[in-house]
Amino acid sequence: MTRIREVTRAYCERSDVLASVSYFGTFAVYFLTLYLAVTAYGSWALVAPLVVINAMAGVRLYVLQHDCGHNSLFSQRWMNDWAGYGLSTFTLTPYRLMQHNHNEHHKYLGDLEHRRSGEIHTMTVAEWEKAGRLHRLAYKLYRNPLFLIPVGGIFVYVLRYRWPKNTWQIGVTGVLVHDALLVAWIGLLYWMAGWPALYIYVATVCVAAFSGVFLVYLQHNFEDTYWDRRPELRHDLAALQGSSALDLGWWFDLATGNIAYHDIHHFNANIPSYRLRKCHQAIRDEFGLPTINWPEALRSFSLKLWDEEDERLVPFSRSESWFGLRSAGV
């Protein structure tokens, strides 16, 4: 672990030029595609791909805000903070709360005693076997991708982030100002182009939210992920083994700001997003870092419970009734 930490440090250098190109270039794509989609309103063959591109630009803006929260996008902390606040309205995510809650996620990654710090809740097999019928039913519904991705995406980004967890402790004023600016941005869209602009905006927010939950799920939910209890918990294994590296193609990496190489990010959060892909490709063979491709990524959505004995994520038993009346049998 010492060796890989030394190697990854070589990729921690911040470049204000690369950061600016990534930052302002993504904003340019975001505003241009939003304008073109609104202009082409009614011609769905043109609007649909523009909505998708705009939504992915929104996802990339979120990744850049996440970089700012780690102080890893620009060379100076004040630059990262101002850039993070500038992104906040368009990611629907209050910057300072995002920074705090995400750092908590890093701190407790893989810790079975602190699963509330994670984005996607995971039950253990033992907890499942002790759970009552209604608890099982709720969990099955929650972990169903047809519910988790669309409903979860809308709930988190549209509703929950209007008042994120820990708001009272971290900053009520910042959240209120953020929400006011978001209302002003939506009002500006309506003033400039009326209802078509709002329809397009809602569509892009939905696609971005669905994509965001899809990505967040895959970052830590895969068969050979890592969970443990203290004092056996190892933070280095939680970072590398408990986080995935999604090798889903160059276009996917471009759209998501390379954050799919999440194992290296968790191991060394100082690496800027514009160096993550290069870092992972340079060291994956030397250190045997596994990658996940599309078939395995899609299969990961069938995994529901953490098996503490086998130390792997497992699906529900095939003999399990949908209402969860039988034992897990996994």
Image (cartoon, helix red, strand yellow):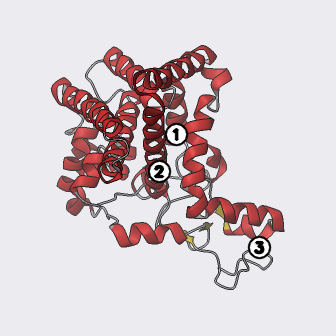
* Position above or below: 138 against 53: below
Q: Position of residue 70 (x, y in %)?
A: 39, 30
Question: What residue sits right under mark 2 in the picture?
Answer: 216
Residues marked 2 and 1 touching at CB (< 8 Å): no
Q: CA distance from mark 2 to mark 3?
A: 27 Å
Q: Nearer the viewer, mark 2 or mark 3?
A: 3
* Position above or below: 311 against 231: below
Amino acid at dot 3: Phe
Is 310 in front, or is 89? 89
Question: What residue sits right under mark 3 in the picture?
Answer: 323
Q: Position of residue 141 (x, y in %)?
A: 68, 63
SS assignment at label 1: helix
Is 251 in front, or is 191? 191
The residue carrying pointer 1 sits among few (fewer than 14), some (14 to 19) or many (20 or more) residues within 10 Å by Cα, namely some
Residue 69 picture quarter: top left
Question: What residue sits right under mark 1 in the picture?
Answer: 107
The residue carrying pointer 3 sits among few (fewer than 14), some (14 to 19) or many (20 or more) residues within 10 Å by Cα, namely some
Amino acid at dot 1: Lys
Q: Earlier in the sequence, mark 1 or mark 3?
A: 1
SS assignment at label 2: helix
Q: Residue at x 19, y 30 (%)?
A: 21
Q: Nearer the viewer, mark 1 or mark 3?
A: 3
Q: Residue at x 39, y 71 (%)?
A: 296
Is 49 in front, or is 171? 49
Amino acid at dot 2: Val
Q: Nearer the viewer, mark 2 or mark 1?
A: 2
* Position above or below: 24 against 59: above
Q: Earlier in the sequence, mark 2 or mark 3?
A: 2
Q: Position of residue 45 (x, y in %)?
A: 31, 54
